[in-house]
Image: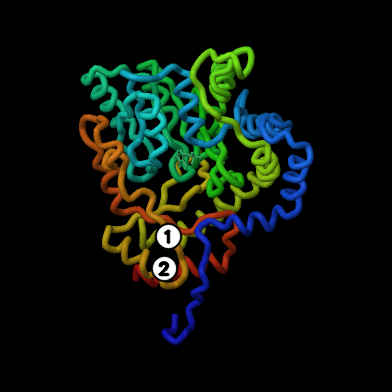
């Protein structure tokens, strides 16, 4: 570029919920108005309709909507009676809620390392973490694989170990719902799958929300109870501990409309990611999608040497291009999680990734001129 060419510096959103809102337009107003008119703000007809549609979307037998992705994880662990003395294995390179869910119910999260190329659980580290837990007198009970940044974990490899150790598999698909693994949909890969409808997620609502997907009839029935204070015959018959775990009817109404365009948005997100990778692969380590996997690109994350990463973030910021670092600190290095065990041979890959990762703007409404602006700015900064 000629040095006298004026660089466009208008701010680009990292995730453009406004553009999606524009596309959806009046259908959202009509859907929410219907709820405002019938006034069944909790457990209204939209909640059941959405649950059926969500289950059908991924091919799970059941979907149970709830108050957040974190609550989807917590409620499932509660429903499985997991608690003190139990080890729950999860990656350290993830959002805190993955491990928080186990710690909140008194179980012990045991941290596992990830692969540098997929950012997802390394099964060799999982095996080592199981030995660590046993050596500390903990009972291995569950594994929470995370489909980080939208890419499915290696679910077959995880299931093989889980089967051998009789671990319950709770897939944390807060970022990965909508993705596919060897022709199977996320939502059908674990014994249960938790997802989040936080507004910035690939399938987000207009507040907090989440869901559990499962084929297990018994688990569903316990989850229904946990969702409403451990109710038995009714809300005032309390047969177990539970919480206020419902999804608002208004959010279900919003999600019904968003689910209709979700497939189309996944296609567009993949188009954006492919273009980024094609244009940036010679100057940065671009994300790997193994054959037969489909990501929903909750984040588009590249890797650079630490000095270069921070320089890139600053350079893009001056041009109105936001970046984010997911995650600057793996969970085992966080104050709240430092006391929990880590896989015996350490978590070196997660520590390295924390120094190298940087995510670029990613959403389904990133048009080609804006993609070009980002690609061009990254290339200039790294040249
Ligand atoms: C991997 C992961 N797990 C769990 C959650 C928790 O979801 P929520 O924010 O809906 O509680 C999130 C999102 O924030 C997440 O990214």
Name which residue lies at 67% across and 44% down.
254
Name which residue lies at 64% across and 41% down.
251
Give me the disc on residue 317: 2
**Disc 1 element:** loop
Q: Is residue 107 above or below residue 301?
A: above
Q: Are marks 1 and 2 in contact (CB under 8 Å)?
A: yes
Q: Quadrant of residue 113?
A: top left
Q: Is residue 279 above or below residue 231?
A: below
| Depth check, front residue: 81 or 176 | 81
Name which residue lies at 21% across and 19% down.
135
Q: Earlier in the sequence, mark 1 or mark 2?
A: 2
**Disc 2 element:** helix
Mark 2 residue crowding within 10 angstroms, few (<14) / some (14–19) / many (20+): some
| Depth check, front residue: 240 or 266 | 240
Q: Is residue 242 above or below residue 29?
A: above
Question: Could you tell me if residue 216 is visible in this image?
Answer: no
| Depth check, front residue: 378 or 50 | 50
Residue 282: where, in percent of width, then height? 38, 61
Q: Quadrant of the C terminus?
A: bottom left
Residue 56: where, in percent of width, then height? 66, 30
Residue 207: where, in percent of width, then height? 58, 45
Residue under pointer 1: 323
Q: CA distance from mark 1 to mark 2?
A: 8 Å
Q: Quadrant of residue 310?
A: bottom left
Q: Quadrant of the N terminus?
A: bottom left
Q: How is the rendered protein coloured?
A: rainbow
Give me the disc on residue 334: none
- 220 displayed left or right of 338: right
Question: Could you tell me if residue 348 is visible in this image?
Answer: yes
From this viewpoint, which residue is outermost toward the front? 236
């Amino acid at each position: 570029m000629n040095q006298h060419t004026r660089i466009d510096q208008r701010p680009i959103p990292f995730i453009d919920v406004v553009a999606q809102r524009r596309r959806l337009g009046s259908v959202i107003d009509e859907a929410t108005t219907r709820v405002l008119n019938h006034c069944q703000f909790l457990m209204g007809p939209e909640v059941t309709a959405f649950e059926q549609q969500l289950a059908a979307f991924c091919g799970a037998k059941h979907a149970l909507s709830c108050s957040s992705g974190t609550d989807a994880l917590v409620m499932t662990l509660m429903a499985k009676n997991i608690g003190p003395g139990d080890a729950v294995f999860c990656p350290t390179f993830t959002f805190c809620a993955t491990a928080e869910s186990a710690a909140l119910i008194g179980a012990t999260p045991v941290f596992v390392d990830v692969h540098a190329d997929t950012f997802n659980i390394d099964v060799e580290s999982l095996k080592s973490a199981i030995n660590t837990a046993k050596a500390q007198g903990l009972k291995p009970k569950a594994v929470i694989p995370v489909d980080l940044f939208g890419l499915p974990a290696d679910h077959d490899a995880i299931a093989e170990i889980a089967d051998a150790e009789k671990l319950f598999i709770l897939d944390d698909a807060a970022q990965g719902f909508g993705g596919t693994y060897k022709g199977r949909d996320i939502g059908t890969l674990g014994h249960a799958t938790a997802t989040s409808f936080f507004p910035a997620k690939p399938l987000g609502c207009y507040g907090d929300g989440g869901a559990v997907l499962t084929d297990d009839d018994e688990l569903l029935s316990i989850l229904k109870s946990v969702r409403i204070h451990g109710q038995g015959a009714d809300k005032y018959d309390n047969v177990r501990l539970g919480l206020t775990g419902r999804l608002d009817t208004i959010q279900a109404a919003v999600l019904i409309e968003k689910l209709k365009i979700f497939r189309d948005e996944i296609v567009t997100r993949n188009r954006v990611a492919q273009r980024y990778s094609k244009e940036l692969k010679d100057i940065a380590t671009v994300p790997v999608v193994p054959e037969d996997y489909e990501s929903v690109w909750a984040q588009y994350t590249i890797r650079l040497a630490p000095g270069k990463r921070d320089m890139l973030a600053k350079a893009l910021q001056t041009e109105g291009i936001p970046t984010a670092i997911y995650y600057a600190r793996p969970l085992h290095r966080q104050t709240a999680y430092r006391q929990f065990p880590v896989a015996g041979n350490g978590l070196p890959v997660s520590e390295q990734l924390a120094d190298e990762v940087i995510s670029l703007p990613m959403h389904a409404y990133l048009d080609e001129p804006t993609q070009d602006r980002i690609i061009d700015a990254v290339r200039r900064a790294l040249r």
